[in-house]
Image (tube, rainbow, N blue to C red):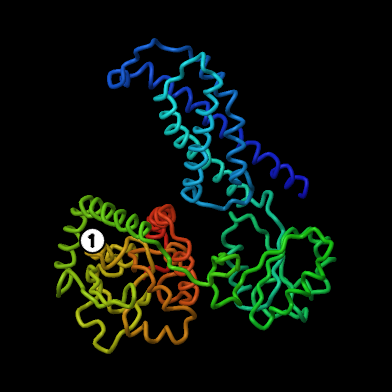
Amino acid sequence: MKGRHTKVEVLLPILTILFDALSIFLAYLNSYYIRFFSSFQKIFPVTEGIPELSSYIYFFLSTVPIWILVFQTHKLYRLNRNVFILDEFPSIIKCVTISIIVSIGILFFFRGYSYSRLVFVLIWLSSIVYITISRYLMLKLEKTLYNKKIATKNVALIGSNKVAEEIYDRFQKNTYVGFNVIGYFNREGKECFKKNMKLIGDYNSIPSAIKSYSLQKLILCFSSEETNDLYSIFKICEGINIELILYPQFLDIVTSKLKIEHYDGIPFMKLKSIPMNVWNRMIKRIFDIVFSVIFLILTFPLFLIIAIIIKLTSKGPIFYLQERVGMDGKKFMIYKFRSMVVDAEKDGPAFATPDDKRYTKIGKFLRKYSLDELPQFINVLKGDMSVVGPRPEREYFVNQMKQTIVKYLERHRVKSGITGWAQVNGYRGSTTSMQTRIDYDIYYIENWSLAFDLKIIFKTLKEAFFSKSAV
C-alpha cells in the first residue's frame, strides 16, 4: 500500500506537468491559427506575411520550462490540493501572466525574428482556458483516486472532544480529502465515543502506533483544557517523521488569519482586521448588481409561474416581508415568496422544521429548492444584502444566540447574503449546529475573494437540488 501511495505521489505531479505543457502547446497552436488563418485577419490584417509555425514551436520548447517553474514556485504541483477549480483560477491567471511576461522578455534575445504581439495576447487567453480545463480534470482524477481509497494518507486524531468527533465524521463522509482516519488518541487512553471510532491508545503509545499503522499525519484537536498537552505531543514525536497539524479551536477570540505587522521595527500580531477594504467592497457591490440584474431577467418567467401557483394554492399575499438584522446591526425588510400559511408565527417566532405543519401546499417544495429566496435579489439591488454572505436572522433570534454562540455578532461585519459558505457545506436548517454555521461564516468573512464568491454560487446550485437539510 505504501509503495502504491509513493507511486501516485510521483506520477500525479508528473502527469499534471505534462497536462500543463500540452495545454500551453495547444494554446500556441490555437493562437497561431486564429491569428493567421481565421476571420481574425479581417479585423487585424496581416501586413508582413505569415510566419512559419515552426518558429512558434521552437519558442514554445525554449520557454515551457519557465512556465513549469513559475507554476512550481506557486505550489501548483502539490498533492492533496482538495480545492474547487475556482480556488486555483486566480493562481492560474497569475502564473500564466507571469510566464507570458517572462517569455516576451526572452524575445529580446531573438531580435532577428519578429513575433506577432497579437499571438501572445491570444496565447495568454487560450492558456488560461486550456490550463483551467486540464487542472479541473486532474483534480477530478485525484479526488476519484482518494474516493477509491487509493493513495490516501493514514491519519489519527489526538483529542476526545466534540470537535474531534465532528472532524472524524467529516473525513469519513468526504473521502475525496484523501485522509484515512485510523482512530484517535487521548490522554487517559480510555474510550469516550459511542460511535465506531477506534481508540488507538494514550499519548505514550503514539510512537509505536505511528509505525504499526503507518501513520503520516496527526490531527491535534485540543480543547482549552488540553492545550498544555501540546508540548508533550511534540516531545513524544521528537525525532519521528510525522506531520502534526492543529485545529485551533481553543483560540476562540483569535482570527483564523493571524498576521504579523511591523511598526517602527516593533512586531505586532493583528488579531482582528477590517474584512474588506474600499476597493474590495466596490468590486463586490458591482458584481452583486450585475449578477442580480442578469439573474432577475433570466428568471422572470419563473417568478411569474411561482407567483401564480402561490395565489392559486393558498390564501394570502404572494410575497412575505420580514424584518432581519444585517450589516452593522442595521435592520431591513427581506423579501421572500410566501411558503407558509398566513399568521404562521401567531404564537411567536420559531425556526422552520422539515415536517413543519405551517407550510402551504407548495411551500415545502419552495423551501427545499430555495425558490422562496429568489425575491431576495431585489434586496441585493437595493443594497440591503449581497449575493453571498452570512444568512440574515431576526432580532429575536439574534438576541438569543449572541449570548450562547461564540463570535455570533462577527457575522454582522459584512452584508448578509442569499447564500453562504455554511449553507453550501450543508449547515442550514434547524437540525444543524449553529456554532458550526457561525464558524463557517467567520471563515468566509476573513477569507473573502471574488473567486470565493463564485465558488459558493456554483456550489449553491448543487446544494439547492441535493441538500437534505433544506427547510
Residue located farthest toward the front when viewing the structure as drawn: 264
Q: Is 343 positioned to the left or the right of 153 in the image?
A: left
Asked if residue 180 is positioned above or below residue 347 in the image, the reply reads above
Q: Secondary structure at mark 1?
A: helix
Residue drawn at (41%, 73%), measured in percent from left and top? 411
Residue drawn at (47%, 85%), measured in percent from left and top? 404
From this viewpoint, is residue 366 visible? yes
Residue located farthest toward the bottom when viewing the structure as drawn: 347
- The percent coordinates of residue 113 (x first, y second) are 50, 14
Q: How many marks?
A: 1
Asked if residue 75 is positioned above or below residue 430 in the image, the reply reads above
Residue placed most toward the observer, 387 or 111 = 111
- The percent coordinates of residue 85 (x first, y second) are 49, 47
Amino acid type indicated by mark 1: Leu
- When asked about the image quadrant of residue 218, the answer is bottom right
Residue drawn at (61%, 77%), measured in percent from left and top? 250
Q: Which residue is mark 1?
A: 381
Q: Is 296 positioned to the left or the right of 193 in the image?
A: left
- The percent coordinates of residue 226 (x first, y second) are 69, 80
